[in-house]
Amino acid sequence: MSEQLRPDLALIARTVRQGARVLDVGCGDGALMAALRDNAGVDARGLEIDGSNVADAVGRGLSVVQGDADTDLRYYPDASFDYAILSQTLQTTRRPDLVVEELLRIAAQAFVSFPNFAHWRGRISLLWGGRMPVTRLLPDTWYDTLNIHHVTVDDFRALVKDRGWTIDGQWFLKGDKETTHANANLFAEHAVFLLRK
Amino acid sequence: MASLSMTDDSRFGLRRQVRLAGPLPLDSGAALGPVDIAYETYGTLNADRSNAILICHALTGDQYVASDHPVTGKPGWWWRLVGEGKPVDPARHFIVCANVIGSCMGSSGPASLDAATGAPFAMRFPVLTIADMVRAQAMLLDHLGVDRLSAVIGGSMGGMQALTWPTLFPDRVESCVVIASTARHSAQNIAFHEVGRQAIMADPHWRGGDYYADGQVPSAGLAVARMAAHITYLSEAGLTEKFGRRLQGRDAKTFGFDADFQVESYLRHQGLSFVERFDANSYLYITRAMDYYDIAEDHGGSLARAFTASKARFCLVSFDTDWLYPTAESRIIVHALNAGGAQASFVELSSPFGHDAFLLECPELNRVVDGFLKGGRA
């Protein structure tokens, strides 16, 4: 599988340890899982809500279960994975805080990546246009977007602090390039956090 | 050269039947022996015996998974999944499909002769379970020299057997495909089966099961059983699309009890054609086996515990319009497998055809099964 990974996934793929046990929550068609399996000997399992994505992932030989992050994580035993991955899914869950709690129960560490809704482009769009932003990063309109919890980098940091989680790593992306931590809340389009309890 | 010897070996090929001495100990405490098993094999067992796939059939199915049925002349019941260029391919796999014990297509069942009396067993045949069927399959595989299954695959009752395999023989199964099935028969499932059994037993020709001598078989009862069951294999939307309220060969209602509606005519046809190929007592025994089926019950109430000894990979598929073994039943299995850390895949596919979808055209099903069996190996 030499397909190009999305930048946040490529970053996660570079960070996951060789041979680790990984649960990818919201794994889509399994692109990251396949890369981890093929390049890093990772034992990867997936959870994905969309049936046709699951069919794609199973079709490439991956162990993926159709299910919902909000309701199905409780069936996984404690500490059964080295990493849980929640990429671009946090903002679509009904209770993002509880989902992250579950990830940290199931796995020693959790990658959480999300689009930063405080990126300056979105701010300007809302400030001057008075409309919910529709940008390259957030291409859907308010009524058909799957994103139901709009979260910013600073919001997420506040949640982490409030829950007493530990940040083991954080990365910020602008397009497909990593960007500075300084003013990430204003300049980062995507954030990737690596957490532990 | 395995391939050379296999063509000469009468154990392999189409329309095989073997008498195994047994005795096969049964869950009921009784034993069955000798055990006749009718089966077919396709393809060639490779040198390291690593390419064997067992296909398990459903309630009224048979061993003719990929060859023409000798009675009906129809193509094999799972030709869409098994055959040249299909996900299960005799060019790559050694494929075995056996008639379950209790059935009537050549394996030991109530219509078989009891060696002790020289007469058909009828209701003196021991009551069976799904696990008993699986143990008989294992005896057959011993006879064929197959120690390990690369995969066991089944839909509906075949899925129950497939799911039972790794619980009974954890070291013999590498992967397991369970389609449109369940880990236990629900009260509703049992209820529908009881309607069918009572229809058969209420037929005056049934006579306590001793109807083999004079050929007066309980066909009316069996036909009704089939009609009731057939409804559970379809979906409301599918029935509406296929028949609606359309009338059968007439312009107006007759104000009588002929088959006015197309759906009535269709069901009657299903019932009548079924009795030509199936034994009423076998229908009683196999539905009973399904009703007794509850994997968790056999493992102290814990479904997860049933699979702890197995290293198999699992693939579960349900269909969104299947109300006989709905998606929730597959999810119960998936959650149990997740709890035990098993490698499990599960997908609910979309089809208008209800439970029957697993036998019908479904490219997504083929894609999922093909990808799962290849397991990421090109």
Image (cartoon, rainbow, N blue to C red):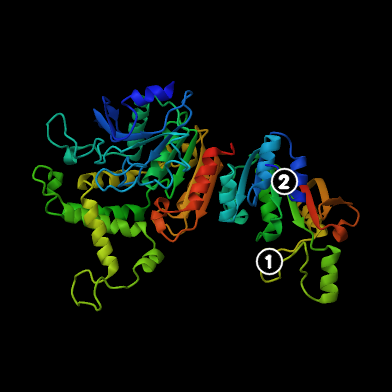
Kindly tell me whether residue A55 is visible in this rendering. Answer: yes
Q: Quadrant of residue A62?
A: top right
Residue A21 visible? The answer is: no
Which element is circle 1 on?
loop
In-front residue for pair B294/A23 = A23
Same chain check for tags 1 and 2: yes
> Residue under circle 2?
A110
Q: Which mark is residue A145?
A: 1
User: Do the numbered discs 1 and 2 sit on residues whose CB atoms are within 8 Å?
Assistant: no
Mark 1 to mark 2: distance in Å? Answer: 25 Å
- Which callout, 1 or 2, points to the residue nearer the camera? 1
Q: Is residue B282 above or below residue B25?
A: below
Query: Position of B377 compared to B329: left or right?
Result: right
Q: Residue B84 versus residue B125: which sits nearer the camera?
A: B84
In this orientation, which residue lies closer to the viewer: B340 or B41?
Answer: B41
Which residue appears farthest toward the right when viewing the image?
A: A182
- Tell me the amino acid under the disc marked 1: Thr
Q: Picture coordinates of residue B331 (x, y %)?
A: 50, 50
- Out of B7 and A113, give the one closest to the viewer: B7
How many numbered marks are there?
2
| Between discs 1 and 2, the one toward the N terminus | 2
Kind of residue at badge 2: Ala
Determine the chain carrying the residue at label 1: A
Q: Who's the residue at 83% across and 58% down the image?
A: A154
Q: Quadrant of the C terminus of chain B?
A: top right
Q: Which mark is residue B200?
A: none
